[in-house]
Image (cartoon, coloured by chain):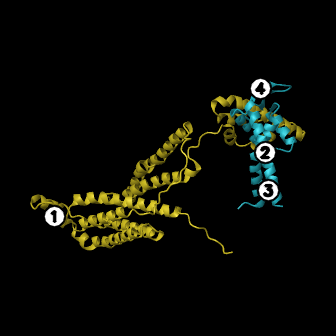
């Protein structure tokens, strides 16, 4: 390979990465310029240009990818630096969430399988080719949305909206609303605790009442052993809301208590799900557990949002004494 | 943490990057092709890597700051660049800004002596 071949090959590699309309013109000019550079170097070295000299020149010029990027006019950014972390969190979080839900189902299948290793490997293979790889739809979906949003921003830039300070104080409590929330929660808890009595009160005695009583009857073991654990958590949550309503605003301490109690509630509910039936009737139990899963998911999201807000609060940095 | 030499190199690179466009515009009041422009800049103490300069010429042209044409003058065909009307205005404005900045920086650097 002689020096000209090196330059031709290099220019070809750069031109291939350029937009079609630029390719020929830029390629032709780049080759002419590199040849002049090479001739200059050969003259300075006092010997004819050779392959090594040409290689040194193009290596100094840059990798074809980078050079092509430098020739391209500035394009639009798909994900802005300020959005990168959020994007990564959403993409990876969604992926891991799907895997987190589907992997336990793969490891502990519903059917009473023997659990032999080869069956596990079969299940693993099936999981990977279905949910495992399938979960990648989420990052792909996010990238597609980001591309469309970015193109719209680039095509029709918003020039009218200006930043305005927000006056919304998240820590301020709407007292009437808070009192209403506490009373509603009290009512809801009472209904749950005294469900049989509540049904008897609401449904006139008769066959229908009997059916409803049977359908909504708690499992005896749950009622005597697990259910009572919910009461202290509820009481603590209600007491916290009452304190906040009296104080008129959330403080760091009350916020942290709120997060901790939320986490405790999620743990207790998860335990309920795993420990056995909650309702005596199987269909009721199945439906209610589905709802409890949803409630746990909401609590976890709520905790994540509140934790994030707590972490994003501006705190005074450590000061050194003067 | 960067070592001092590396930090100096990076800071100097940023500084030169900021003034590169003005340096290029200053030499393109008369038509030059890429290689001759690089030589002209280097001769005046402003060495620019070819991999930086040549793409920059294209980008400035696409922004309407430079005009260009292929010519054959005692050698192979070369693409010559020169300031466009918009480029002349930009050069004038940037020169004024630069002089203002130099005066400001002189004041700042003088204060720190």
Q: Residue at x 83, y 40 (%)?
A: B41
Exactly how many numbered labels are in the figure? 4
SS at mark 4? strand
Q: Residue at x 84, y 27 (%)?
A: B75
Whichever of labels 4 and 2 marks the residue nearer the N terminus, that label is 4
Residue A278 sits in which quadrant? bottom left
Q: Which residue is mark 4?
A: B70
Distance from the alpha carbon under mark 3 to that under mark 1: 84 Å
Numbered circle sitting on residue A201: 1
x then y, percent, for residue A38? 82, 37
The chain letter for the residue carrying disc 2 is B
Q: Which residue is mark 3?
A: B108
Q: Which tag is nearer the camera, tag 3 or tag 4?
A: 3
Residue wearing tag 2? B98
Q: Are marks 2 and 1 on the same chain?
A: no
Respond whether the residues carrying marks 1 and 4 are from the same subunit: no
Image colour for chain A is: yellow
Name of the residue lying farthest toward the right: A46
Local SS, label 2: helix
Give the chain coloured cyan. B
Residue B32, placed above or below residue A198: above
* Left or right: A143 in relation to A121: right
Marks 1/4: CA distance?
95 Å
Q: CA distance from mark 2 to mark 1?
A: 86 Å
Q: Nearer the viewer, mark 4 or mark 2?
A: 2
């Amino acid at each position: 390979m002689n020096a000209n071949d090196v330059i031709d090959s290099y220019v070809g590699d750069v031109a291939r990465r350029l937009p079609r309309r630029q390719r020929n013109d830029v390629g032709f000019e780049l080759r002419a310029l590199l040849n002049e550079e090479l001739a200059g170097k050969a003259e300075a070295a006092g010997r004819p240009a050779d392959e090594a000299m040409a290689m040194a020149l193009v290596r100094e010029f840059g990798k074809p990818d980078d050079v092509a990027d430098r020739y391209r006019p500035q394009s639009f950014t798909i994900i802005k630096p300020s959005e990168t972390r959020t994007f990564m969190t959403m993409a990876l979080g969604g992926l891991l969430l799907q895997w987190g839900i589907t992997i336990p189902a793969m490891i502990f299948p519903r059917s009473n399988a023997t659990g032999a290793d080869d069956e596990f490997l079969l299940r693993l293979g099936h999981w990977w080719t279905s949910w495992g790889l399938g979960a990648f739809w989420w990052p792909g979906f996010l990238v597609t949305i980001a591309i469309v949003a970015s193109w719209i921003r680039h095509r029709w830039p918003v020039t009218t909206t200006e930043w305005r300070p927000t006056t919304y104080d998240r820590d301020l409590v709407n007292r009437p609303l808070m009192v209403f929330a506490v009373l509603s929660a009290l009512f809801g808890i009472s209904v749950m605790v005294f469900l049989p009595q509540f049904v008897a009160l609401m449904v006139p005695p008769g066959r229908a009442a009997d059916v409803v009583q049977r359908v909504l009857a708690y499992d005896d073991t749950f009622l005597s052993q697990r259910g009572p654990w919910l009461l202290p958590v509820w009481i603590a949550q209600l007491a916290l809301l009452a304190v906040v309503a009296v104080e008129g605003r959330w403080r760091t301490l009350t916020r942290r208590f709120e997060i901790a109690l939320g986490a405790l509630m999620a743990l207790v509910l998860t335990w309920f799900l795993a420990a056995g039936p909650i309702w005596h009737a199987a269909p009721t139990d199945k439906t209610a557990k589905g709802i409890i899963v949803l409630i746990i998911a909401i609590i976890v999201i709520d905790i994540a949002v509140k934790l994030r807000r707590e972490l994003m609060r501006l705190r005074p940095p450590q000061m050194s004494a003067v | 943490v960067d070592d001092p030499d590396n930090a100096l190199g990076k800071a100097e690179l940023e500084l030169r990057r900021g003034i590169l466009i003005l340096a290029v515009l200053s030499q393109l009041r008369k038509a030059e092709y890429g290689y001759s422009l690089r030589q002209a800049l280097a001769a005046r103490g402003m060495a620019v890597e070819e991999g930086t300069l040549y793409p920059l010429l294209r980008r400035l042209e696409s922004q309407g700051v430079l005009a260009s044409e292929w010519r054959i003058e005692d050698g192979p065909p070369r693409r010559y660049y020169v300031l466009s009307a918009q480029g002349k205005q930009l050069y004038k404005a940037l020169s004024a800004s630069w002089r203002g900045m130099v005066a400001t920086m002189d004041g700042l650097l003088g204060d720190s002596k």
